[in-house]
Amino acid sequence: MKRRVVITSMGVISSLGHGQGEIIHSLKEGKVNFVRPDFDHEVACAPVSNFNVRDYTGRFKDGRYLSRGAKFAVAAAMAAVKNSGYKKEGLAEAGLFVGTGPNLDIGSEFPEIQNGNIDRHDLQALWILKFLPNTAASIIAKLAGIHGENLTISTACSASLQAIGEAFRKIKAGYLDFAIAGGGDSRLSPGGILAYKKAGALYVGNSDPEKASRPFDCNRKGFVPGEGGAFFLLEELEMAKKRGAKIYSEICGYASSLDAYNMTAPERDGKWGRIAVLSSLREAEMSPSQIDVISAHGTGTLLNDAREADLIGDIYTGYKPQVIALKSWIGHTASACGAMELAISLTCMQENYLPEIRNLQEPCHGEINFVQEGRSLSFGTCIIENFGFGGQNSVLVIKK
C-alpha cells in the first residue's frame, strides 16, 4: 500500500503580509511592497514590514545567533507548529527539513575589518553561529521539541522546495510519519545586494520600484530581491485523518536535478530542468495535461525566463495550463522562494483565485497561457518550479 503525504499546517511571512488572510487580501487588492533600499538607490527590493521574531517565539536567548533570514525560518516554522494542533511533546519524533542560504550581511556583522582581522572587544563569543547553515534548524528543534531525522539544505534557489521534497520522500517511504519542512531567507543587506549586483542578475534602474519585477516580459531587466519564510507540517494521510487534521493539499510528486553546465546560467536547451519536471509528474502519476496551474520560477532575468518559457512550451504541447509568477509579487526570496511560492499557491488554491503576473505587458513566449489578469478560478493541481544558481533544479506537484 502506497503511503500518501498531505500538508496539514502552514506558517508564512512575506512582504504581502503575515499569514494566508493578509496574503490573499494583498493579492486581490494588488498591494505590494516594492521599495528602494536606503543604501542603494539603483535597485529595488521587497522587504517584510512589521516583523519581530519574538512575536512567534516569545523571549529566547538564542535569538541573538540568528541572521535575519534565519529569523524568518524560525518564525515561520513556529507559526506552522502553532497552527498544527500539536503540543511540544507530540513533536518529539517529527522530522525537520530546512532550506537555508548564506548570511551575506558581512558588513554589518564585521564593520571594521583591517588586514583580514575580524576580532574586536565586542565580538560575540559564538559569532560563528550566525554563519552556520544549521543554526535555524537547531533553534527550531529546541523551541518545538523535535528530535527526529533532519536535514539542512543550501542549494541556492532550490533549497526550500528540496527540503519539502525530501521530507515528502521520507514520509512516503515510511522513515517518518510527519515532519516540519520549509525555509527562510533574506539578502536585503549591502553585502547581499552587492553580490547579486556584481553578478549582473539584479534589476538596476530609476523606474518605479513597483514596475521593476517583470517576469516573462520582453523588457525584463533582472530580478528584485525579497525576503521571508514559509514552513509546513507534512503528515502521512491516514495519520492526519485519524487526528482530524485540516488537509490543505496532497503532495504527489517531487524531483530534483543538476544542469552541470554553468555556475549562474541555465543549461542552453533546459534538458535537465525538463527531466526534473517530467520526473515529478511521473512520480505523481500525472500527465502534463492534468496540471491546471504552473507556479513558475519566473525571476525576471533574461536567460532564466527564456529557458523556463521554452521548457513550459515544450512540455505542455496541445494543452496550456495557467502560468503564474509569484516573484512579481514578493520579489525573489532566494533559498526561501520554493516554500513561499508553495504557501501562496496553496492559499490561491484554497481561495479559488489566480493572481496576474505583474508588469507582464509583452510576453516573451507567444504559446504560453500566462495569467495577465487576476481572476477567480477553481483549480485542483499545481506544479511549483525552482531553478537556482549552480544549475539546481527542483519541482513539486500538489493537488487538492
Image (cartoon, rainbow, N blue to C red):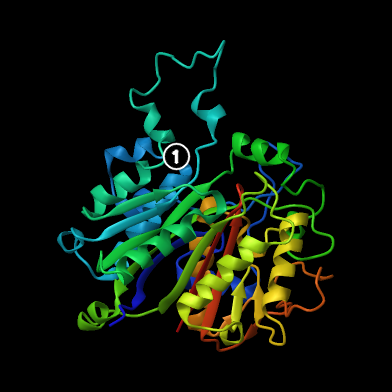
Residue at 65%, 73% in the rendered image: 324
Choose between 174 and 230: the one closer to the eye. 174
Choose between 68 and 346: the one closer to the eye. 346
Choose between 7 and 127: the one closer to the eye. 7
Q: Residue furthest left?
A: 89
Instruction: Find disc 1 in the rendering and name its residue.
Output: 67
Q: Which residue lies furthest to the top in this view?
A: 115
Query: Vertically, is 302 above or below 355?
Result: above
Residue at 73%, 58% in the rendered image: 300
| Mark 1 neighbour class, 10 Å CA radius: few under 14, some 14 to 19, many 20 or more | many
Give the amino acid type for the residue marked by disc 1 in the picture.
Ser
Residue at 70%, 71% in the rendered image: 357
Label 1: element kind: loop
Query: Vertically, is 206 above or below 217?
Result: above
Q: Position of residue 365 (x, y in %)?
A: 80, 72
User: Quarter of the image holding residue 291?
Assistant: bottom right
Query: Vertically, is 393 above or below 225?
Result: below
